[in-house]
Amino acid sequence: MGRLHDILILSDDDRVTLQQKIDKGVLPARALKRVEILLHSDAGYSVDQIAEMVSRHPGTVRNIRKRYIEEGVESAISERPRPGKPRVLNSKDQTLIASIACSEPPAGRDRWTLKMIAGRFVELSNHDSISRQHVGVILKKTN
């Protein structure tokens, strides 16, 4: 007997749903590959054969098939949220940086530099440090 998820048979409703998604032609490329994986699985191809046909790693094929079995068709073809790095500064901090940049520069200076803004921000906030590049990105976004 094969490993779990080596044999996959789609329900009639799921097969029709997946075929309709392909026929419409509006899916993102990654979702389209997932649909193809499920349809090839239903056709009886092995994991390695499907991986070769859709140019994906066999582990990816197994993961998509597993998601279909455990969570259903929509979960199997949709993107999951990616955690990413948490934000360093909240909107209050960004506002503070913008207000520093818009205020009068220190005595003897014509304008604020990114390094000076970063230093003043550290003085006024509870942050230990901030790079001048990060200040520049924030100012560019806040206009």
Image (cartoon, rainbow, N blue to C red):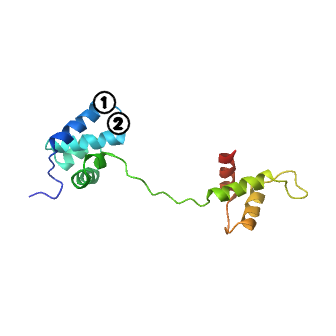
Which residue matches tag 2?
27
Task: Determine whether, in the image, residue 99 is placed left or right of residue 105.
Answer: left
Quadrant of the rendered image containing residue 77: top left
Task: Determine whether, in the image, residue 129 is placed left or right of residue 1.
Answer: right
Q: Are marks 1 and 2 in contact (CB under 8 Å)?
A: yes
Instruction: Check the picture and name the quadrant holding the C terminus.
Output: top right
Which residue matches tag 1?
24
Instruction: Check the picture and name the quadrant holding the N terminus.
Output: bottom left
Residue at image position (65%, 47%) is 141
Q: Secondary structure at mark 2?
A: loop
Q: Amino acid at mark 1?
A: Lys
How far apart, in angstroms, are the residues tagged by discs 1 and 2? 8 Å
Residue at image position (20%, 49%) is 47
Quadrant of the rendered image containing residue 106: bottom right
Q: Is residue 119 visible?
A: yes
> Can you say whether 26 is above or below 135 in the image?
above
